[in-house]
Image: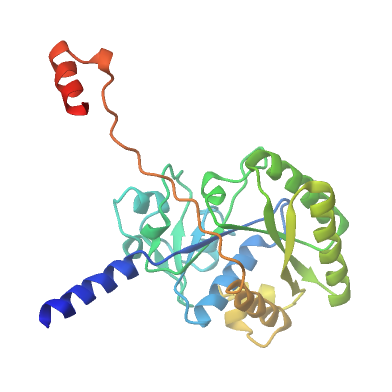
Amino acid sequence: MSKIVSDQADGLRRLLARAPVRVMAFAGLLRGMGVTSVAMNLAAGLAQQGRQVLLLDEHHPAAESVCSVWNCEPAGSVADVMAGRMDCEEAAARADCGVGVLSALQPVHAFDPLRLQPHQVVLIDARLDPAGNLSPLARMAGELVLVLRPDPTAITATYAGIKRLHYAHALKQLRFVLNGIADEADAQRIASNMAQTGSRYLGVSLESGGWVHSDARLPGARRQQQTVVEAFPASPAAEDLRRIANDMGQWPWRPAAATPQPQPQQPSMHAMSPRQATVRSAALA
């Protein structure tokens, strides 16, 4: 009996060890869209649901980065975790709301989402490169969410950016969040127009992820080094962000793209000595 129980426990541990990690990247195709604020608030909202959430900060150590706003300093980076120098819990800082925060400034050459466990949801506050394309880390996410303001300049820049991303990364599906809306009917109209334009002219499926009301309490929450979801949970923006966080669990699952670990290279036949070549040929026969 003890052996059966032991085998079952081992099987359960192996199952949990392969539990999926959902990775989503948040980006803006124009400055000032409020991407960092949206990503932080959604992370806090997911943590309030009891999820284990990790937020990767590609803007660290900039003044308005996740680490700066939450006043936390990770001990390591995503690169450290992927290279096996540190485990995720050791490297990440912990915000007061329970969200883990990890610097993603250093380039990541190999990405395995399972190394980010025990976190169930990983959000990336993504940074575009000088050409306006996604970072290597953001390209590995299972879901890309664009954040934009509901004004003509931002919408035009987003359309142009989506076309660029489509050709640069062969993207077929994107979500978008309208940030700072004043009127829900106007937000619904913009969301509908964007979805139609994406499929008709851009060759991309654009799906609305929701919208966030303009809210005077947002600056006050930031002064307290908190998100509006934490500081003012009854505010209109906080209610919108919690609704989006709840809806995220219903979005279709798209696994993150793990980068295979490099395999040792076998020496070519012409680089071997005659004796080595004979031994290898015999082994392959």
Toward the viewer: 113 or 90? 113
The answer to whether residue 258 is left or right of residue 147 is left
Q: Height in image: 115 above or below 282?
A: below
Look at 52% across and 82% down and name the residue there: 49
Which color scheme is applied? rainbow
Q: Position of residue 218 (x, y in %)?
A: 68, 74
Look at 36% across and 50% down and name the residue there: 82
Q: Position of residue 220 (x, y in %)?
A: 66, 77
Look at 63% across and 42% down and name the residue there: 169
Query: Residue 11 is drawn in which quadrant?
Result: bottom left
Task: Report whether residue 183 is seen.
Answer: no
The answer to whether residue 139 is left or right of residue 13 is right
Toward the viewer: 72 or 126? 126
Q: Position of residue 223 (x, y in %)?
A: 61, 73
Q: Height in image: 144 above or below 118?
A: above
Task: Report whether residue 231 is seen.
Answer: yes
